[in-house]
Every structure is written in structure tokens, then in C-alpha cells.
């Protein structure tokens, strides 16, 4: 994974993902009034997606033969789907 993707080296991709994770810890859809699990997903879901992607990139750099690391992008996809579904559901609620 040290090889460049789109001309950008792997560690820089990981740093970009970490920066986005930090950004989405600060910026989140707080205008939606949700409770329980929906609030947790809206608050932390997008940041977790980028954190999982950063972790995957760094694991692939440090241990390229670690096949278990391939589960992380799948988990990121599931987390993103849950975030989007919760966001769409929250926007359809009146009030």
C-alpha cells in the first residue's frame, strides 16, 4: 500500500482520512433532533467511517500481508450505510 494511488502516497491518504475523521468529530448534523441509537449514529457515524478507512490504510502499509485488515473497509461501508440511512430517516421526521 506504500505505492501511490492517484499519485498520492499511502501515508498521505491515511493522513487525509484521519483529518476527515477529526473534521467530522467537530462538524456533524446536529440540527436533527434524534434520540438513542439514531443520535449516536448521526453524531459519530461519519467520523467512524473515516477512522476505519485510515486504520485500514495504515495497517496495509505496516503489514501488507494481513488479510484480516480487508474487513475494515467492509465495516466502513456498513457504518456509512447506517449513517446515510439514519440521516435520511431523520430528515423525513416532522419538526
Image: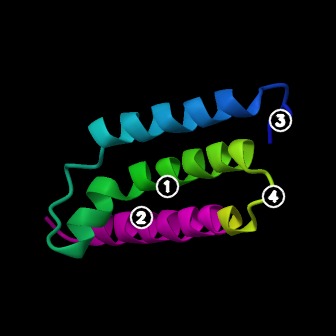
Residue drawn at x 37%, y 41% as measured from the top left: 24
Please tell me which of labels 1 and 3 falls first in the chain.
3
User: Residue 39 placed where, x, y %?
Assistant: 21, 65
- The magenta span reads 71-95
Mark 1 vs 4, N-terminal side: 1
The crowd level at tag 3 (other Cα within 10 Å; few <14, some 14-19, many 20+) is few
Q: Circle 1 — which element?
A: helix
Q: Residues within 10 Å of mark 1 (few under 14, many from 20)?
A: many
Circles 2 and 1: CB atoms closer than 8 Å? yes
3D distance between C-alphas at marks 2 and 4: 30 Å
* Label placed on residue 83: 2
Which residue is tagged 1?
Answer: 49
Mark 2 vs mark 1: give the one in front.
Answer: 1
In the picture of the structure, the residue carrying the numbered disc 3 is 5
Distance from the alpha carbon under mark 1 to that under mark 4: 23 Å
Q: Locate residue 95 relative to residue 7 in the image: left or right.
A: left
Q: Secondary structure at mark 4?
A: loop
State yes or no: discs 1 and 4 in contact (Cβ < 8 Å): no
Q: In the drawing, what numbered circle is on residue 66? A: none
Amino acid at each position: 500500500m506504500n505505492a501511490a494511488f492517484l499519485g498520492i502516497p499511502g501515508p498521505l491518504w491515511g493522513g487525509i482520512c484521519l483529518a476527515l475523521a477529526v473534521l467530522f468529530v467537530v462538524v456533524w448534523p446536529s440540527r436533527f433532533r434524534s434520540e438513542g441509537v439514531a443520535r449516536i449514529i448521526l453524531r459519530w457515524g461519519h467520523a467512524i467511517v473515516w477512522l476505519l478507512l485510515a486504520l485500514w490504510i495504515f495497517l496495509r502499509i505496516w503489514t501488507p500481508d494481513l488479510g484480516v485488515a480487508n474487513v475494515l473497509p467492509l465495516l466502513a461501508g456498513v457504518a456509512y450505510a447506517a449513517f446515510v440511512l439514519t440521516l435520511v430517516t431523520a430528515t423525513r421526521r416532522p419538526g
